[in-house]
Image (spheres, coloured by chain):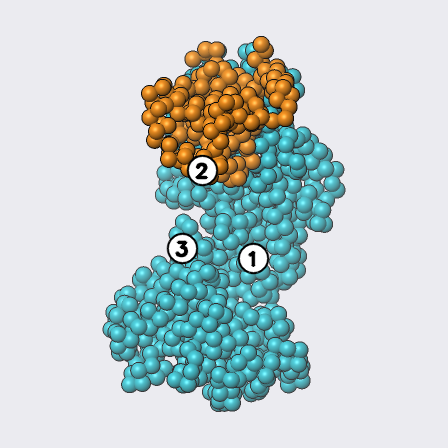
Amino acid sequence: MNAPATPKYAAYVCSGCGIGDKLNVPALEKVATKEGKMALVKTHEFLCNAAGVQMIRDDIANEGVTHLCIAACSRRAKAEAFQFAGVAMSRANLREGVIWVVAEGADHDEVRQEMAEDYVRMGCAEVKKMAAPAGNVKESSSKKILVVGGGMSGMTAALAAADAGYEVVLVEKTGALGGFANNLYKRVPFNGPYAEPQEVGAGETAAQVTGNSKIKVYLNSTVTETAGAPGRFAVKIAAESGSISEELCGAIVQATGFTTYPLDKLPELGGGQANVVDQVGLEALAKSANGGAIKRADGQEVKSVVFVQCAGQRGHGGNGSGAHLDYCSGHCCATSIKQAMYFKDQNPDVDTVVMYSDLRVPGMGEDFYRSAQQKGVIFTKAKVNGVTGGNSCKVDFKDLILDEDVTTDADLVVLATGQVPTAGVDLDEWTATVTAAESGDAAAVEKKSELQKISVLNLNYRQGPDMPQFKYGFADSHFICFPYETRRTGIYAAGPTRRPMDMFQATEDATGAALKAIQTVENVAQGRAALPRAGDLSFPKARLEGCTQCKRCTVECPFGAIDEDEKRFPVFNEERCRRCGTCMGACPVRVISFENYSCDTVGMQVKAVNVPDEFEEKPRILILACENDAYPALDMAGLQRMTYSAFVRAIPVRCLGSVNTIWITDALNSGYDGVMMMGCKRGDEYQCHFVKGSEMAFYRMSKIGDTLKQLGLEEERVQTQEVAITDNTRVVKLINDYVAQLTEMGPSPMKGFG
Amino acid sequence: MTTANPKYKNSFLKEVEANVEDGHMVKMCMQCGVCAGSCPLGPHWEHSPQKIFMMIRAGKREEVLSSDSMWMCTSCYNCIVRCPRKLPITHIMHGLANYAHRLGLAPQGQPTRDIAKLFWNNIIKTGRVNELTFSLAMYFKDGFGQGIKNAMAMQGVGLGLVKAKRLNPMEILGGHSCKDKSGIHKMIAKAREIEDRRKGFAQ
């Protein structure tokens, strides 16, 4: 699209790294010239060195080369050397993909050479369908960062972004900055020697925020509407007074924190009874004592206190009936240690017992734990069966070390209850409510407006007003690869709204989220993708004249990047797009493509492979491998010189979600014996970079059976596998087993008809 | 529940801290159980060190002090080497045994306690161990008849030792002594006085 009027194609074959020894390079050149129809074909014995790269540069400058195919190592290797602005480039993987994985010896010379020639054909075919992506620079892109929530996480994110030179808008629901930290008497120490509680410091942080000229603070305010996309979020901020301000922001950090699990839901542990408090209740007592003897609500001085850890947490592993929170809130052990110190520091004779099932004090918390032991805090591994409040509280518990049931008494019992995230609207609930409301259910209409009130961001996305929620109502997070990433590009969750954490972790989390927000506004301003394809200039385009308004792309996009216009045509918000190509894989009429990645760039590679007839007994198997995990695993197998069958031809794809079924039917029609797709782990414990991509692929392929039957093919000829980046050994076995299985099955009956 | 030693209160722990060698380290145990798993005599103890420490914190004074567990310690030091919290477990065990013995709460007839008593009484006499009288005291500790039986059973070993000049029969007359016997006696008396003062056994 952006290519000059006269494209010129060139291929460069590297003979270094043993390629020249193992392969017939002149024959490869011939393939590139004759079959690949490359105008310029050159060989270099060390293509990635300065001279080799300069040769390519010179050709681009002097010969007008616009498209180049580099037949050398994997596209994952030497990416910095082979970086040429303004030209389209494909890579034929002769090193990791051929010479390193095909068995040694003259017996294999023929298949090795055939494999290499196919990869050269594929590289040439691919580049001819590519264009150099030009990016999508918007004239007015805001680099301002909106932070929702003025607690420790939000304030830290705002300060981090402001310190890095960015304008920040901070919206806080209450009348003061500080959030939950305002409840605390002291905090768990942030730094060495991790022996004593520290001053909370929320006030100082708040003063820094209000004193920072780059940060604009809205107190008593909420976000009532967020429209647009990264770089151009139009945000309406409503103050309690009713006045509405509008801000244009580039990225959003949602740091909306948590609430504590309600005490009255824990009657079995004495919740709601006199002299049974939760941790925040004890903070209040300690605050009012202010260094003096801590007194109960009835004014009596506390001489003995029992801390019950995991109260209503960790399901049946914790204390309480198990009908409460399933997870560990992470901070409570250190918090109870700190609170026990409140007593011991004031009066060492106060009996403080911490009843835990597992004391979890990660990092330097171990030093803090030791310090409490030094101060004489008793730690007892116990399962608490019940607490009775009153003037003298009774704690029934089983001592898990001594294996006996005991009752002890205490003036005060502190329950370490968990964190409940404040992440806005649950989108599943939202979707159900909206569907019901649209069908005229009056109760649903009312519920919809209730939900809108608890929404944090009030996004006008078609998927709902907030980001999707992860397990247990925590804000979305790509837990395994990019913890700050949510499925709403440019919107980052930070702090305990994302996962349970303590104050120190929250401040670190907030700094990370601020950096992610900065990365996004900078990338968007240059028309590039944000993570995980950070810097990618390509973006999807739809040939709308061919579109059948089926809405599959809008529905299946994991990131809510595609809206619909009134005629139900897709409207792409490129700034929200992660460039995974799930829309491209979804499109039944194949009208969605990227400049450098499309149905054609892969389709032509599939067709470029030379498929031998059935009498040659050389099957051909197409591998569509996710470039994030499976393709690196294949490369790694090569790096370790594991050998796999030379009958496979691997094509990297951006995500298995981008695989369009046309590639599979094309391959089978051309006489391939099988197609194997390798994507990431799907389901709740997904590892897909694009969250839903591999899931979509598995779903789509589950429907391909009928197509195979129509073609008269066995279902086994198409396989979908989950491959992790560490599966280099397994990937070799998968390939070899599959080749053996297909060999036994016999050649595809489609051979010769293609 | 609320007796002189209320449960899960600090009182007994404080008593141990004040009166037992290295007792101040008991509170530092993190209940990992490595000591219990490392002890070669583990299966033969009533209470592992881990449990003893927990019992101290739970205020189980009688049970701890009358336990035979610390008497079973062979001082192999496996637990000290492996304790991630660097508790001197062996020393604490000895300290507890000694404290229980002084209080008269240690188990009666516990063989390690008996041999320790005999050894102590033997060595403080002259400042040197008299192996002959010590062995005989061991043989006869359960009565005269049993003593004769024990001695007869061991006579081969005894004669062999005599032949090899490893056992001098003349030691029965009092035996060898260190140079300053009365000095040793004074030293021991002074040490005892200091220990009594520290541990609250004022006499």
Name the N-terminal-most of marks 1 and 3.
1
Chain identifier of the cyan chain: A
The image shows residue A315, relative to residue A635, as above or below, that is above
Visible residue check, residue A348? no
Q: Residues within 10 Å of mark 1 (few under 14, many from 20)?
A: many
In the rendered view, would you say A418 is above or below A376? below
Disc 3 residue crowd, few under 14, some 14–19, many 20+, Cα 10 Å:
some
Q: Chain of mark 3?
A: A
Task: Return the x and y of residue A640 as percentages of the image width and height.
Answer: 48, 69
Looking at the rendered structure, which numbered label has been put on residue A682? 3
**Observer-nearest residue: A555 or A59?**
A59
Residue at 70%, 49% (x, y): give it: A164
Q: Nearer the viewer, mark 1 or mark 3?
A: 3
The residue at the point 44 percent across, 27 percent down is B135
Q: In the visual, does B12 lie left or right of A290?
A: left
Residue A66's spot in the image, x, y percent?
Answer: 60, 79
In the rendered image, residues at marks 1 and 3 fall on the same chain: yes
Do marks 3 and 2 share a chain? Answer: no
Please give the residue where the numbered disc 2 appears in the rendered image.
Answer: B163
Q: Which residue is drawn at the image coordinates 59% and 53% (left, top)?
A: A230
Labels 1 & 3 near each other (Cβ < 8 A) = no
Identify residue type, mark 1: Leu
Identify the chain drawn in orange.
B
Q: Chain of mark 1?
A: A
Q: CA distance from mark 3 to mark 2?
A: 83 Å
Q: Amino acid at mark 2?
A: Lys
Quadrant of the snapshot with the N terminus of chain A: bottom right
Q: Is residue B167 shown to the viewer in this render? A: yes
- The residue under label 1 is A531
